[in-house]
Image (cartoon, rainbow, N blue to C red):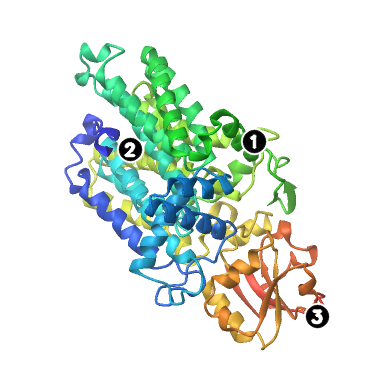
Amino acid sequence: MFNSLIASHPAESLQTLDRSPWGRKWPWWLLGVVVTVAITLQLDPAGDHPGGWSGPGITTDEPLNVAQGVLLADRVFNLDLSGFRRVDAALPDYPPLGRVALGLGHEIAWMLWPPADTGAAYSIACARVMPALLFGLTVALVGWTASCRWGSVAGIWAGVSLVLMPRSFGHAHLASLETAINLGYLVTLLAALGAWDGFGRSNPRLATRKDSWWWSARLVRSALWTGLALGGAWLIKIQAIFLLPVLAAWGLVWLRGRAILWGLLVGGIAALVFVAGWPWLWEDPLGNARLYLGKTTARATIQAWYLGQPWPDRELPWHYPWVLWGTTVPLGLHLVGIWGVIQSARDWRKAGAESLFVLGAAVPLVTFSVPGIAVYDGERLFSIIYPVWAVLIGRGAGAMAEWWLSTGRNRAVGALVSLLLLLAQGWGLWTLSPAWLSYYNAAVGGLKGAVVLGLPPSYWGDGLTRDLWLEVDRHMPPGATLALAPTLYESQAGEFQKQRPVHRQQPWTLVPFGSNAAEQAEFVLLINRPEYLPPEYRNLKPADFVVSTTREGVWLAGLKRLRAAGLNRE
């Protein structure tokens, strides 16, 4: 399938430069395997796999995703369609494909590498294996795409740059749907790009009289692959809706007369895949589809922290997504990506591929800039653009390599300089581990500077790592009560207890902050999500905690002692 999605038509000037093995497929699959293994070694959030490195802490949505995914996967393994429909209908907040993938990964990982304590019904660490695998595949596709089009330097920069984006790399460690929808979004764009390549617009020598007919086999084949990919993306998460305006705008410009028929075929196939793949829709396809979209747009208000204050999600300033995106990718990668866009614009008549990727990155950001659109969950709502931006970074790197060689400079020196510049972008990946979702680039002075400017220090609670839990166990006296703040849903504290083998053996109790049980708490375990913290806890320093997870002088989670009689600070 992927052979038909990615056409190998680099510019003639780059064809003569790319004689390395990176022009083939196997190095990219090898890179994807290496990335997957590296992530898998650092997944454990709470002690299920003490032999592995400490991974990000359990984040807000993971218990819900994994519990539902395991139930769905169990029905799949047993070929129980009616049972699958019952489980899915009980929680139709998301289409099932992403959660089924988490569940399947969980079951396979449980068999191959079971948790140390099987007292819980499921393991967050086991479910995190599937996103690691999907991220490795995404890295391989990004690198291969750029290499085929703009040369080996472009491919290496594209694939590695995606790994060096801490926010993208961090989400690949979580049992969430982001990595899956990012892959689905990218594959759909690559499938659509096959239409342009198939009709010979990137290489006129491929064009024939037969290919100009609307009912040509190439048109149908391209629409089939694109429709299948689009329907699959819709079955993962709502962010795939952005593909509609992206494909429509791009098709009208680059496919011209074929665009209408191609678009109708793509839309029809995608709709069939979407309905066929989501049994909840079968009883009332239109009604349940409207209900799904209504739940997405009419959900409860979520607070976001921006410019040093909490904002309701529909009242955030228009520049919020642009600032967050601009500050969460290493600055050097941004500069190379911008250069790639500029180079594409200079010869825009031949930039059919680049224009598709630019649209794929711009449409989500522009949409979330519209006043009244709910913007929440930090970078997660537009995380789909990170792989797309990595491809454009590869385009910029390829142009830089071409310029270097055109001036007659030494090839080996150029390769060394390029490699050093690329690896220098990974500093944040190293220093923030495993709290990658708190990364900010040098434009705002890193995490410390971002906090001074009023940007959110932590959103997902991933700073509540296994290492911090072990320190909490060491400091908590027998019989003590520990309050968790903020508590974002009723069962959050209980889910944390279920996932911690050590905690199930400890004589202390974890309770939600603000509950009746928390009135007797001697300690509070804080996650630095200031929009949901009491005001007196927003300006704490690492020295105010008994123990904490701290990066760049900023606390992300920590244990604070309280008075025995209540929740007033000492």
Callout 2 touching callout 1 (CB < 8 Å):
no
Question: Of callouts 1 and 3, which one flags the residue occurring earlier in the amino acid sequence?
Answer: 1
Distance from Cα at disc 1 to Cα at disc 3: 46 Å
Instruction: Give the amino acid type for the residue marked by disc 2 in the picture.
Output: Ala
Residue type of the residue flagged with mark 3: Glu
Q: Compute the Cα span from label 2 to label 1.
A: 45 Å
Q: Quadrant of residue 261?
A: top left
> Which x, y percent locates residue 526?
68, 69
In the rendered image, is residue 555 in sight? no
Direction from residue 219 to residue 431 in the image, left or right: right
| Secondary structure type for disc 1 | helix
Q: Are the residues tagged 3 and 2 within 8 Å (C-beta)?
A: no
Q: Is residue 104 above or below residue 95?
A: below
Which of labels 2 and 1 is toward the front? 1
Disc 3 is placed on an element classified as loop
Query: Which labelled disc corresponds to residue 491?
Result: none
Q: Earlier in the sequence, mark 3 or mark 2?
A: 2
Residue type for callout 1? Gly
Residue indicated by mark 1 = 294
Q: Is residue 176 above or below residue 226?
A: below
Q: Who's the residue at 44% across and 38% down the image? A: 277
From the image, tell me which residue sits under label 3.
Answer: 570
> Which SS class for mark 2?
helix
Residue under numbered circle 2:
399
Q: How far apart are labels 3 and 2 at the CA level?
A: 60 Å
Of badges 1 and 3, the one in the foreground is 1
